[in-house]
Amino acid sequence: MTRPGAFRTEDLTVRYGGVLALDSVSITVEPGEFAGLIGPNGAGKTTFIDSVTGYAKASGKVELGGIDVLPLAAHARVAAGVSRTFQSLELFEDLTVAENVLVSTENARWWSPIVEFVRPRTSTMLSSAVEEVLDLVGLTAHLDAYPPDLSLGERKLVSVARALATEPALLLLDEPAAGLDSDASLVLGRQLQSIAERGVSILLVDHDLSLILDVCERINVLDFGRLIASGTADEVRNDPAVVAAYLGEDIDTAEAVR
Ligand SMILES: Nc1ncnc2c1ncn2[C@@H]1O[C@H](COP(=O)(O)OP(=O)(O)OP(=O)(O)O)[C@@H](O)[C@H]1O
């Protein structure tokens, strides 16, 4: 895995017409840190991921290892080490798990076809890269399975594996635990923890607050596009602004705040 240094946004701002979806948000995730991003509905969580990955026009800075990737197109940010998952998994149902991951490595870089022409890869090289990623997410046993034969939790891990296949320094996960029960959610969380331990910086967005509070080292909280808190689970739990944002709900049990 590449490890170019910290991920940092500075005054990241996104406007959709008259809506200020992100308002000067500055967040740092250290290399190998497992960070979370939470906030009530419409707080700007997906917009944050979209703006970091080049899917939404933004102003401010998005630095990875000291380089501002904000001016880059989405595909160039992937090459710079930024990867993401989407709320909808969009797996290819007719391809095996390994092939689903392989597709991602094939699309990872715009110059791949040129490299492929000059230095064709062997099937052994392809399978070892794919196997390594599937091993990371604990799906080695399902390499030849088809997505419909997997549990929802395993399908989610395939989409994480696809994102990892681009060898990211930063992995942004948009609601990977949606639809999972608390046990499956925790299995996913533990798997993500082990990926962060390998040096990948992770930013996890989810509505499953108990998962985020349990597995993330640092939690950032958005409300109406603004960063209202950033700290450990205990710090965030006891932050009056966070409690107010969740309308007094006990954020330990406010699992579904949709
Ligand atoms: N493409 C868009 N055009 C206009 N407004 C948008 C667009 N996408 C998001 N918004 C608005 O930007 C704000 C932030 O939305 P966003 O989806 O980022 O929030 P979120 O925290 O991810 O919400 P949720 O938890 O419901 O997924 C909301 O007011 C939303 O209505």
Image (cartoon, rainbow, N blue to C red):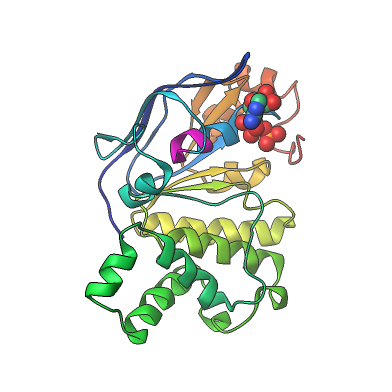
Is 63 above or below relative to 88? above
State left or right for residue 42 relative to residue 112.
right
- What stretch of residues is rendered in magenta? 50-54
In percent of width and height, residue 133 lies at 43, 70
The prevailing secondary structure element of the residues shown in magenta is: helix
In percent of width and height, residue 234 lies at 55, 32
Q: Which of 161 and 114 is in front in this view?
A: 114
State left or right for residue 40 relative to residue 7.
right
In percent of width and height, residue 192 lies at 50, 57
State left or right for residue 149 relative to residue 205.
right
Residue at 27% of width from left, 73% of height from top? 117
Is 2 above or below relative to 18? below
Residue 92 visible here: yes
- Judge whether residue 53 is colored magenta: yes
* Image quarter in which the N terminus is found: bottom left
Point out the quarter of the image occupied by ligand 1: top right
Residue 232 visible here: no
- Judge whether residue 179 is colored magenta: no
